[in-house]
């Protein structure tokens, strides 16, 4: 079974605080997360939102997406709603996330090993 080739990226961007920009063709905002301020309201159309901006998050825009929405992305960059970033910055972000994930997995494994050793010691060293 053949796998799809990895997409090539045309553009790397990050959000600008206070400037909401949709990922064109989706319902997602680039670098912004919506927080519902009145979750007790049953009617979702009456929800009020506060946006939290992750201006350090870098988003890679695939060539096909950029080709389709070139005008919109170009406008968002030129009016200051998006900040252009480099492929190197994006790769550094990916590398850091990978390192953090590996460290978390290692820490979890060490904690599990320690807990198992303590359980064995408490059981008098006997195993089933």
Image (tube, rainbow, N blue to C red):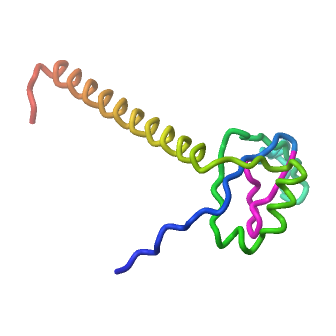
Question: Magenta stretch mostly in which secondary structure?
Answer: loop
Front residue of this view, candidates 1 and 74: 74
In this rendering, would 82 be left or right of 93?
right
The quarter of the displayed image where residue 54 is located: top right
- Residue lying at 78% horizontally and 68% vertically, measured from the top left: 70
Q: Position of residue 15 (x, y in %)?
A: 76, 46
Please say whether residue 63 is one of the residues in the magenta stretch. Answer: no
- Residue lying at 77% horizontally and 40% vertically, measured from the top left: 52
Q: Position of residue 72 (x, y in %)?
A: 84, 65
Q: Position of residue 77 (x, y in %)?
A: 82, 54
In this rendering, would 116 be left or right of 63?
left
Is residue 108 in sight in this rendering? yes
In this rendering, would 56 be left or right of 87?
right
Please say whether residue 25 is one of the residues in the magenta stretch. Answer: yes
Look at the picture and state if 70 lies above or below 57: below
- Residue lying at 77% horizontally and 66% vertically, measured from the top left: 24
Q: How many marks?
A: 0
- Residue lying at 50% horizontally and 41% vertically, measured from the top left: 97
Front residue of this view, candidates 34 and 9: 9
Front residue of this view, candidates 63 and 28: 63
The quarter in which the N terminus is drawn is bottom left
The quarter in which the C terminus is drawn is top left
Q: Position of residue 76 (x, y in %)?
A: 85, 56
Look at the picture and state if 118 lies above or below 98: above
Q: In the image as oriented, which residue stretches furthest toward the bottom?
A: 1
In this rendering, would 115 be left or right of 53?
left
Q: Which residues are magenta?
A: 19-31
The quarter of the displayed image where residue 18 is located: top right
Is residue 43 in sight in this rendering? no
């Amino acid at each position: 079974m053949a796998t799809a080739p990895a997409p090539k990226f045309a553009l790397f961007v990050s959000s600008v605080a206070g400037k909401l920009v949709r990922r064109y063709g989706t319902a997602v905002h680039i670098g912004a997360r919506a927080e519902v301020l009145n979750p007790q309201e049953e009617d979702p159309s009456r929800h009020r939102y506060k946006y939290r901006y992750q201006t350090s998050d870098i988003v890679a825009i695939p060539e096909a997406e950029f080709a389709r929405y070139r005008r919109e992305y170009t406008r968002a960059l030129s009016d200051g709603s998006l900040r252009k970033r480099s492929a190197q910055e994006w790769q550094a972000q990916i590398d850091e996330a990978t390192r953090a994930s590996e460290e978390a997995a290692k820490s979890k494994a060490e904690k599990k090993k320690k807990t198992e050793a303590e359980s064995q010691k408490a059981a008098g060293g006997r195993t089933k």
